[in-house]
């Protein structure tokens, strides 16, 4: 196959990133200490390949993402453990087990939400500890709010599928009828998290089978301001808890394009992604992040500030779907949310900001396919910002099946107090310990 791009293949070297002198940022991070605020960004399924693919397509090979500017970077391992024998590793984890690891500091088996493998004990989470120490808390996502990553902070159930009161089949011991804490939706409201935003309104509208109540009714009774669209963000005020539910299921992806397919379909011409897919009624992740920070911040106070988790959820979901445009659009939207966080942290140096992922995923950047040599899995050609075709391959499951997670280690990068502790090779459970150190009883004189 011949592609007509050789004439424009020269990458513009003048555009290469200059990282500059980071000595001061590194020096202040090494000072350690406690943080008034923690901003934790979790890119679901955002392995090194996903980051590189988004950079190559949207900015060019020599471009740099906002997350690339963080001064300190390390790697961490993400394996989970087996339910039948927690001493055995499971090399390919899911978001429930990995979320439990960073949220509680404990390994668990795939599917569990902040509960221990085997004996099903509740494991205290970093959000619960932050609340006990007087921090405001927030938990936002582009998935359903009851999906695994947001759930691990403010719920404890046997299985991630127990999202609403009508979804409790896999969690018999968590049912309210037997004295349990109820579904993920009900527990998130009962936890009094100050800011909750994402999709998943259908879960919050499910009636509890025993009592006929919904989690939205619980939220209103519990003092939450409940909104269902982007316009409602302007009405939310500090001092009142916010529940924003912007879609019945997962929120809409920012970009769309053609799914990857087996060679030789889909390779006649490299595709250009369509970038205007999100409806106006749904806020972007960056808008949600900015609003959450405004609601949670306590300007002028010298005591504890806030803990906020921001999940870019559909990087993973579009990777499962072998849809490179959907995946890249979500990675770029996540990066814009990170930029919002970095701007806040730069103005508030007592903020620990961490960017990482929960598990690696399927997509790979591979060579140009030919009749003789091409991946056996699914491929898609993309026309990058360099005006050069790039081939992405998905090969962790067969065509028309959900592409699987992978078991590679991940990037973890940070700025602010405790950020120096991301350097080297860690385990995902170390992120909990790092955030816990940042939450040590706050010093009373805080420079702002
Ligand atoms: Zn996944």
Image (cartoon, rainbow, N blue to C red):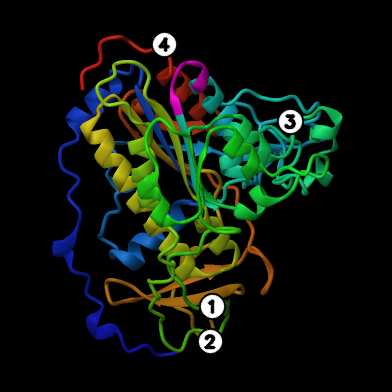
Which quadrant holds the C terminus?
top left
Asked whether disc 1 touches disc 2, contact meaning CB atoms under 8 Å apart, the reply is yes
Q: Position of residue 169 (x, y in %)?
A: 83, 46
Does residue 413 appear to the left or right of 385 in the view shown? right
Q: Secondary structure at mark 1?
A: loop
Quarter occupied by residue 13: bottom left
- Answer whether residue 247 is magenta in the image: no
Q: Which residue is mark 4?
A: 441
Q: Position of residue 434 (x, y in %)?
A: 45, 24
- Say which of marks 2 and 3 sits in front: 3
Q: Alpha carbon of mark 1 to alpha carbon of mark 4: how far?
A: 56 Å
Looking at the image, which residue is at 72% across and 39% down? 183
251 lies above or below 184: below
Q: Which mark is residue 371?
A: 2
Q: Which residue is mark 1?
A: 374
Q: Secondary structure at mark 3?
A: loop
263 lies above or below 20: below
N-term mark: 1 or 4: 1
Q: Alpha carbon of mark 1 to alpha carbon of mark 2: how far?
A: 7 Å
N-term mark: 4 or 2: 2
Asked whether disc 3 touches disc 1, contact meaning CB atoms under 8 Å apart, the reply is no
Instruction: Pick the residue in front: 19 or 157.
Output: 157
Q: Position of residue 143 (x, y in %)?
A: 55, 53
Q: Which residue is mark 3?
A: 181
Does residue 237 appear to the left or right of 189 in the view shown? left
Find the magenta span and give its range: 131-136
N-term mark: 3 or 1: 3
Quarter occupied by residue 279: bottom left
Asked whether disc 2 touches disc 3, contact meaning CB atoms under 8 Å apart, the reply is no
Q: Alpha carbon of mark 3 to alpha carbon of mark 4: how far?
A: 29 Å
């Amino acid at each position: 196959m011949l592609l007509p791009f050789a004439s424009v293949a020269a990458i513009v070297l003048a555009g290469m990133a200059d990282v500059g002198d980071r000595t001061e940022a590194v020096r202040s991070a090494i000072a350690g200490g406690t943080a008034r605020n923690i901003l934790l960004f979790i890119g679901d399924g955002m392995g090194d390949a996903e980051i590189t693919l988004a950079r190559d397509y949207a900015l060019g090979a020599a471009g740099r993402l906002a997350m690339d500017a963080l001064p300190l970077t390390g790697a961490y391992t993400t394996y989970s453990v087996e339910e039948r024998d927690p001493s055995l590793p499971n090399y390919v984890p899911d978001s429930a087990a990995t979320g439990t690891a960073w949220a509680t500091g404990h390994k668990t088996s795939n599917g569990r939400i902040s509960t221990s493998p085997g004996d099903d004990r509740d494991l205290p989470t970093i959000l619960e500890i932050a609340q006990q120490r007087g921090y405001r808390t927030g938990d936002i996502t582009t998935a359903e709010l009851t999906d695994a990553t947001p759930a691990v902070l403010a719920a404890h159930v046997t299985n991630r599928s127990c999202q609403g009161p009508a979804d409790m089949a896999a969690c018999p011991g968590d049912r309210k009828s037997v004295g349990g804490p109820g579904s993920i939706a009900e527990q998130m409201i009962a936890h009094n998290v100050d800011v909750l935003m994402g999709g998943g309104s259908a879960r919050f509208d499910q009636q509890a089978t025993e009592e006929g109540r919904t989690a939205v009714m619980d939220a209103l009774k519990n003092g939450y301001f409940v909104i269902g669209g982007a316009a409602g963000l302007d009405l939310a005020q500090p001092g009142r808890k916010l529940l924003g539910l912007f879609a019945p299921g997962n929120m809409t992806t920012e970009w769309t394009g053609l799914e990857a397919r087996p060679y030789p379909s889909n390779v006649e011409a490299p595709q250009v992604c369509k970038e205007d897919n999100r409806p106006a009624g749904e806020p972007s992740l960056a808008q949600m992040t900015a609003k959450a920070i405004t609601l949670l911040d306590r300007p002028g106070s010298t005591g504890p500030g806030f803990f906020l988790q921001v999940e870019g959820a559909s990087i993973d979901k579009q990777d499962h779907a072998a849809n490179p445009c959907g995946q890249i659009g979500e990675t770029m939207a996540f990066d814009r949310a990170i930029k919002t966080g970095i701007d806040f942290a730069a103005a508030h140096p007592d903020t620990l900001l961490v960017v990482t992922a929960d598990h690696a995923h399927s997509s790979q950047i591979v060579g140009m396919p030919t009749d003789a040599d091409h991946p056996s899995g699914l491929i898609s050609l993309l026309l990058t910002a360099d005006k050069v075709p790039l081939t992405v391959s998905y090969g962790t499951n067969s065509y028309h099946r959900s592409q699987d997670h992978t078991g590679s280690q991940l990037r973890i990068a940070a700025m602010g107090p405790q950020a120096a502790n991301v350097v080297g090779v860690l385990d995902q459970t170390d992120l909990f310990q790092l955030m816990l150190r940042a939450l040590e009883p706050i010093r009373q004189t805080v420079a702002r």
